[in-house]
Amino acid sequence: MCPMLAYQGDEANQDERSQLRAAVVMSLAGSLCAADASIARRLLLEETVMLETAGVGATEALFTLVAIVARFANPADVWLLWRARQATPETRLGVDVEQVGRLGIEQSRAILEQAASGDGSNADDARQALAWITQGADSGAFDDLAGYFAWSDDRFGLTVAGST
């Protein structure tokens, strides 16, 4: 089933693959468990690549996957959230920095700071991601994370069926 869901880089069956990914995302959101983390990460990467290739747009599946991946609270996923945010102009407006709060703000910053101390595009991305997080913190985005998480879970239909 995974190859049928995957963005293949060509136009053949892309609408069908997008619809399949969206259906799987809705199913995941309705009954999350710890075993779903890897498929959620893969689907977020697939959706991000599809949007990056298109260069425009945003999908409900991408925003839901950002919330799902954040729900697993793995600070290393800051890179996935950042890439999803950067995919298109619309995702830059629609991916909430508060989702980084679920990953752990300080832990996510530490990962990005380590990468930012190097050279190259990864370092540039890390510096930009750090600036996004800092701007969010300065604007109060992390002041009521419990309230934001309740809203996000409701907004994206996230229901935990097991421990995450």
Image (tube, rainbow, N blue to C red):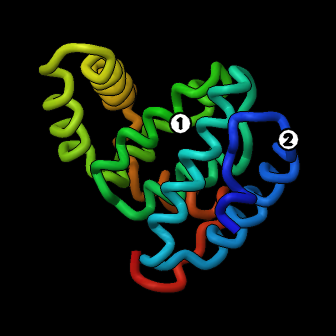
Q: Is residue 47 left or right of residue 139?
A: right
Residue 87, x across and y down, in percent? 58, 27
Image quadrant assignment for residue 8? top right
| Tag 1 secondary structure | helix
Examine the rendered structure and indicate whether residue 21 appears above or below residue 54: below
Task: Work out whether mark 2 precedes mark 1 in sequence or the reverse, and give the earlier one.
Answer: 2
Q: Is residue 140 above or below residue 103?
A: above
Q: Which residue lies at the image location 19% right of the left edge and 28% below the top edge? A: 115
* Amino acid type at image mark 2: Ala
Q: Position of residue 49 (x, y in %)?
A: 60, 36
Q: Quadrant of residue 124?
A: top left
Q: Say which quarter of the image contains residue 151.
A: bottom right
Cβ atoms at labels 2 and 1 below 8 Å apart = no
| Label 2 – label 1 distance at C-alpha | 23 Å
The picture places residue 113, in percent across and down from the top left corner, at: 17, 29
Report the side of 150 relative to 52 (left or right): left
The residue tagged 2 is 12
Alpha-carbon neighbours of circle 2 within 10 Å: few (<14), some, or many (≥20)?
A: few
Viewed as shown, does residue 73 lie left or right of 119? Answer: right
Q: Residue at x 57, y 62 (%)?
A: 153
> Residue at left 37%, top 54%?
102
> At 73% from the left edge and 47% from the top edge, which residue is drawn?
60
Q: Which mark is residue 84?
A: 1
State the SS at label 2: loop
Of badges 2 and 1, nearer the viewer stands 2
State whether residue 87 appears in this view. yes
Q: Is residue 154 above or below residue 19?
A: below
Q: Amino acid at mark 1?
A: Ala
Work out whether residue 138 can be spotted.
no
Q: Is residue 126 left or right of residue 53?
A: left
Q: Which mark is residue 137?
A: none
Quadrant assignment for the C terminus: bottom left
